[in-house]
Structure formats: C-alpha cells, structure tokens
Amino acid sequence: MPRSVILEWEGKEYEHNPKSADWYWALGILATALVIALVLFGNYLLAFLVVAAAAALALHAAKHPPLHRFRLVEQGLLINDDLHPFERMISFTVLEDIEGDLPPLLSIKTASWLSPHLLIPLENVDADAVYAHFLRSVDEGEHSRTIVDLVAAWLGF
C-alpha cells in the first residue's frame, strides 16, 4: 500500500454538542406520546420503529465522535485506511463559514451508494492547497445543505 501522501490532517466527523437532561426527557415524552397514539390506532410496526428510532437518536446524542485521519494521496482521499478514489467522485466544493467561527468543510459527492456525500473538516490543514489538488482531479460543483443536514442542525447535532 505505498502511497505518497500529499497532505495529512486529523478531524472529527462532527462537533459534539452535549445534550441536557431536558433534551432526553423531551425525546422520551415525544416518543412515548407517539407510541401510545400509534398503538391506539393499531399501527404496532410503526410504534416499534418509533421506539427504535428514539433509542438510536438518544445513543447517537450521547456518543462522542471519533477522531479520523485524512490523507490526500495521488489516487484520492484516504479516510483512516479507506480509499475514496477520485474516479468515484462526482463533484466537490469547499464550504466556508461566513463568520469564520467554524473551520472550512470539504464537501464531496460520490458515486458510492454507501457514502454518497462526504463532509470533511479542513482543520489544521491548508484549505487552499486541498482545493487546488481536488480541482486538478474532480469537477467543482455547487453543494447546498440537504434536508438531513437541516434536521440534524435543528436537533442539535
């Protein structure tokens, strides 16, 4: 696996926002009310899915994001030991915070159905150098926030 590393940096997948006890209580009350209504209407499968979704949401809210190692190589982008080749990338862009409070993000749309959209934090690395290298290999495109991003932000993730 000899690959020449052009740039290397580390970053977390997302910024952890600790949730208060009130947040968990609100989630539990909302899920319980929804489950009771669904059971009264006889929709047991959806009630089970609501319980599973609420549990998954609570577990995700409690966990801290892992630290990933990003390496830009000639073939593509290595995230830990997983190679995302340039050939499978459809487009990219660098998203920057207007206020400058948050680090820039590298947004990549890929042809992979398992990870169709990658958001890579560009902390402790020259974002202009990453942009220039990607521009040589991948088309630049306009990326906007998805509905999933907006819901996650609304929920505090």
Image (cartoon, rainbow, N blue to C red):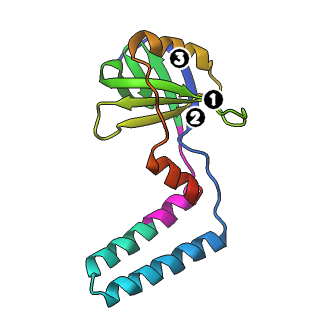
State the residue at coordinates (57%, 30%).
Answer: 10
Q: Amino acid at mark 3?
A: Tyr
Q: Quadrant of the N terminus?
A: top left
Q: Which of 13/109 is in front?
A: 109
Q: Amino acid at mark 2?
A: Gly
Few, some or many residues within 10 Å of mark 2 (<14, 14–19, 20+): some
Q: Badges 1 and 2: C-beta atoms under 8 Å apart? A: yes
Q: Amino acid at mark 1?
A: Glu
Q: Secondary structure at mark 1?
A: loop
Position of 61 with respect to 138 (left or right) is right
Residue 89 appears in view: yes
Image quarter of residue 98: top right
Few, some or many residues within 10 Å of mark 3 (<14, 14–19, 20+): some
Position above or below: 114 against 143: below
Q: Badges 2 and 3: C-beta atoms under 8 Å apart? A: no
- Residue under pointer 3: 131
Position of 87 with respect to 27 (left or right) is left
Position of 22 with respect to 44 (left or right) is right
- Residue under pointer 1: 123
Q: Secondary structure at mark 2?
A: strand
Please report the bounds of the magenta region as a residue range. 56-67
